[in-house]
Image (cartoon, rainbow, N blue to C red):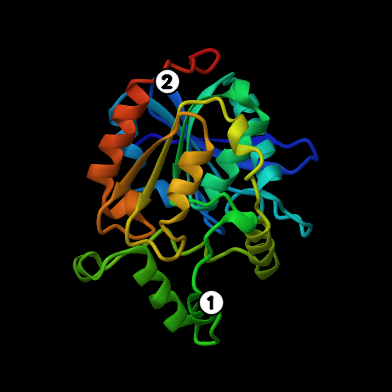
Amino acid sequence: MNVEAGKAVAADGTVIAHQSAGRGAPLVLLAGQSNNHHWWDGARGDFEDAGYRTTTLDWRGVGGSDKPDEPYTTRGFAADVVAVLDDLGIARAHVYGTSMGGRVAQWLAADFPDRVGALVLGCTSPGGPHAVERDKGIRRTLAQADREAAERFLLELMYTPEWLAAHQGPYFVLGDPEMPAFARARHLAASGKHDAWDALPAIAAPTLVVHGTDDVFNPAANAPLIADRVPGARMMLIEGARHAYFDEFRAVAGSAVLEFLAGAPEPGRPAGR
């Protein structure tokens, strides 16, 4: 896979690293909290093979992007995505966001409707008081001092036992290991303070909501909340899947997303391509 790397500059001067591969209609893939673009390594090739030019980015605070020690917000991350689109000369793109990336994608579609073609929201939440939060016991276990045990627990939230037994890694959904501690805390706060409930009815993009039925990291009960809130949204629940459904169940999920995107108007192509 030939990946082209670039650097965009956000409105506040923060440099945002981005990566593009493939040829065809533009598709932006947004990763989860505290993760860099490698979150999508297992699945992005399927979209490129299907005729899309995929673009990922490193959130501010991770990977090759700048890491300012200041408050981050999911709404601010959406503006960073627009900076990447501008840098690439993309007027409009399909957007597929998972986990925190799905939170960001909600703001992207609400605040910048002209930049979003079709929208896919995976394993995400509307945030705020209307959201279904994960169990407090899960939070405590993830915050334990034994980081090796916490990481193993996170893997079990991401994947089924059968998958873990058959796949020894490396895993790309556990957070950027080189991310500074302050930036990790900033990401956690941004995701935790997300609340797009009032903005969801304004989303005009054709929308597909995808979630694994066995996801307790971001409870599956959030999927119908979003689907009922976004006008005309469709919902797909993947039986037995946990949080990293897009990786473990990529054949099922990828096919469904591609079918959905095929039925949406082509968003346009990058300038000069």
Q: Nearer the viewer, residue 103 or 198?
A: 198
Residue 213 screen position, x and y as percent: 32, 57
Q: As drawn, is 244 to the left or to the right of 102?
A: left
Q: Which of pointers 2 and 1 lies earlier in the amino acid sequence?
A: 2
Residue 103 screen position, x and y as percent: 57, 47
Say few, some or many: other residues with alpha carbon within 10 Å of mark 1 (under 14 / 14 to 19 / 20 or more): few
Residue 167 screen position, x and y as percent: 23, 64
Is 160 situated above or below 11? below
The image quarter containing residue 111 is top right
Name which residue type carries label 2.
Answer: Ala
Residue with the mark numbered 2: 25
Q: CA distance from mark 2 to mark 1?
A: 42 Å
Q: As drawn, is 147 to the left or to the right of 84?
A: left
Q: Is residue 29 visible?
A: yes
Is 56 situated above or below 189? above
Is 147 situated above or below 182? below
Report the residue at 58% width, 25% height from top.
Answer: 88
Q: Of the residues tagged 2 and 1, which is closer to the observer?
A: 1
Query: Mark number for residue 136?
Result: 1
Name which residue type carries label 1.
Answer: Lys
The image quarter containing residue 197 is top right
Q: Quadrant of the N terminus?
A: top left
Q: Secondary structure at mark 1?
A: helix
Q: Nearer the viewer, residue 172 or 240?
A: 240
Report the residue at 28% width, 50% height from top.
Answer: 238
Say few, some or many: other residues with alpha carbon within 10 Å of mark 2 (under 14 / 14 to 19 / 20 or more): many
Is 190 situated above or below 105? below
Report the residue at 74% width, 44% height from top.
Answer: 14
